[in-house]
Image: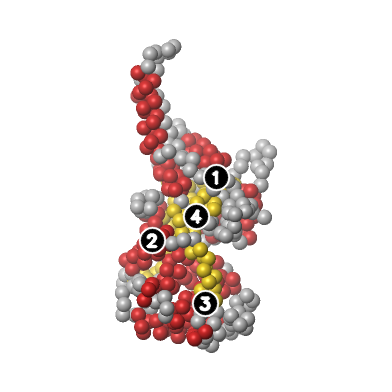
């Protein structure tokens, strides 16, 4: 039931009551009655979370006598794997590989992807398809050869290049398999933040208009495609110096109606939702500010990663004097832009990214933290286990767990989740 329908139903019920014969005391005039508070729809929330969010909104929003409009309450939310199911930066990366959406010269491309290399072979399981060790330097050399071949063949064609023009090209098949393999190796060796920054920098030489157009196309592509795990394989015809490699990639992007409704209801309560994501800000803002997708937030309340700009073109370096919004950087953004100005911590935190672990520790007075039940690295796993545990006697619950079905991209009205390819509900171990 939508909020508008809720209020309409309430009004019709009141009119019926007033038209009925009086029994006992007369009903008070409508203008003296308390207005109905905006309520979250049930949808597929885990019920205890929905109830706790609603109670906090009622107690701290502008229906409360304690509400201070000059210091509005606010909540902080991840975008990837919270407001949407899936990772928008990863989806854009996969789309760019499928459609060869790169504009930088080959030498700049080489310098960018070479930043994390070393002469030592990559560790297991990052071997080639014959099980032989892979040198990062050889892998980069092979990638540059693929890139040069693709740029020579398709560089003059406006991006994105139609998939059917590329799908049988051995250079494209080799390039996307090696790039996915390389990205996963960077993540394993240097951490998810380094891997995230690595794929964001691949947008160098694009204008903001280019990136927004690519993001829109990637969103439509992801939302319209099935949720699948695919294996990208380098053809033996392009074995290169490192030998053919392969990588498994997961394609997953779905809207989350529960969050769309939550954002609307919070704003009706006078509570500001703030998005803080480790994805590129332009990529997130396209989604978050769009009424078309059902989120409809203000752009100034969306914070993400930023690249330096030169004459309207993105560079392969982060914007100066702006922290990368992950870990302590994400916390610093919230402290600077909201806690210090509004003299209060976030009322609630909604976390789906591992990059929010520091945020969960940094605000002990935050009343509620909603976490998505999904596989996470250890820095988040501890919070997931706490959310899954029974509440301690005499202590209010702070951490809540929301389940989802990764096979359909929908939330579940439970704390447990269904991993992709499984029908067995799981809880954090």
Q: Which residue corresponds to mark 4?
A: 409
Q: Which numbered disc flags the more N-terminal residue, 4 or 3?
A: 3
> What number is the disc on residue 402?
none
Residue placed most toward the observer, 405 or 285:
405
Q: CA distance from mark 4 to mark 3?
A: 26 Å
Q: CA distance from mark 2 to mark 1?
A: 27 Å
Q: How many marks?
A: 4
Q: Which residue corresponds to mark 1?
A: 413
Residue placed most toward the observer, 147 or 165:
165
Q: Which residue corresponds to mark 2?
A: 220
Q: CA distance from mark 1 to mark 3?
A: 38 Å
Residue 308 in percent (x, y) is at: 39, 69
Q: Quadrant of residue 327?
A: bottom right
Q: Which structural element holds mark 3? A: strand
Circle 3 crowding by C-alpha within 10 Å: few under 14, some 14–19, many from 20: some
Seen in the image, is 242 located left or right of residue 156?
Answer: right
Q: Which residue corresponds to mark 3?
A: 233
Seen in the image, is 395 located left or right of residue 81?
Answer: right
The residue depicted at 42 percent of the width and 36 percent of the height is 38
């Amino acid at each position: 039931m939508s909020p508008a329908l809720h209020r309409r139903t309430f009004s019709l019920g009141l009119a019926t009551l007033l038209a009925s014969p009086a029994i006992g005391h007369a009903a008070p005039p409508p203008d003296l009655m308390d207005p109905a508070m905006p309520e979250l729809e049930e949808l597929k929330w885990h019920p205890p979370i929905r109830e706790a969010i609603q109670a906090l909104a009622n107690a701290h929003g502008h229906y409360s006598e304690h509400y201070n409009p000059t210091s509005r309450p606010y909540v902080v939310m991840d975008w990837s794997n919270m407001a949407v199911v899936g990772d928008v930066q990863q989806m854009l990366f996969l789309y760019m590989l499928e459609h060869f959406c790169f504009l930088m010269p080959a030498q700049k491309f080489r310098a960018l992807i070479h930043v994390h290399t070393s002469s030592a072979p990559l560790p297991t399981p990052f071997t080639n398809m014959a099980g032989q060790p892979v040198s990062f330097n050889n892998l980069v050399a092979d990638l540059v050869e693929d890139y040069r071949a693709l740029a020579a063949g398709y560089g003059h064609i406006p991006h994105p290049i139609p998939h059917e023009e590329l799908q049988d090209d051995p250079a494209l098949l080799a390039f996307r398999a090696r790039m996915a393999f390389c990205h996963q190796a960077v993540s394993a060796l240097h951490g998810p933040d380094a891997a995230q920054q690595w794929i964001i920098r691949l947008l160098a030489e694009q204008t903001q208009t280019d990136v927004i157009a690519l993001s829109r196309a990637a969103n439509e592509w992801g939302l319209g495609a099935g949720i699948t795990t695919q294996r990208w394989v380098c053809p033996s015809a392009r074995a290169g110096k490192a030998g053919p490699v392969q990588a498994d990639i997961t394609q997953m992007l779905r809207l989350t109606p529960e969050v769309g409704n939550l954002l609307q209801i919070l704003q009706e309560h006078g509570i500001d939702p703030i998005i803080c994501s480790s994805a590129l800000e332009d990529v997130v803002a396209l989604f978050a500010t769009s009424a078309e997708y059902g989120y409809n937030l203000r752009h100034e309340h969306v914070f993400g990663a930023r690249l330096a700009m030169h004459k309207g073109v993105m560079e392969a370096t982060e914007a100066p004097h702006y922290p990368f919004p992950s870990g302590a950087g994400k916390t610093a953004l919230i402290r600077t832009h909201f806690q210090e100005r509004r003299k209060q911590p976030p009322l609630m935190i909604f976390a789906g990214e591992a990059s929010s672990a520091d945020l969960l520790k940094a605000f002990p007075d935050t009343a509620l933290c909603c976490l998505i039940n999904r596989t996470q690295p250890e820095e988040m796993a501890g919070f997931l286990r706490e959310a899954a545990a029974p509440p301690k006697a005499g202590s209010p619950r702070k951490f809540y767990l929301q389940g989802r079905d990764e096979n359909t991209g929908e939330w579940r009205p439970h704390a447990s989740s269904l991993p992709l390819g499984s029908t067995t509900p799981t809880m954090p171990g």
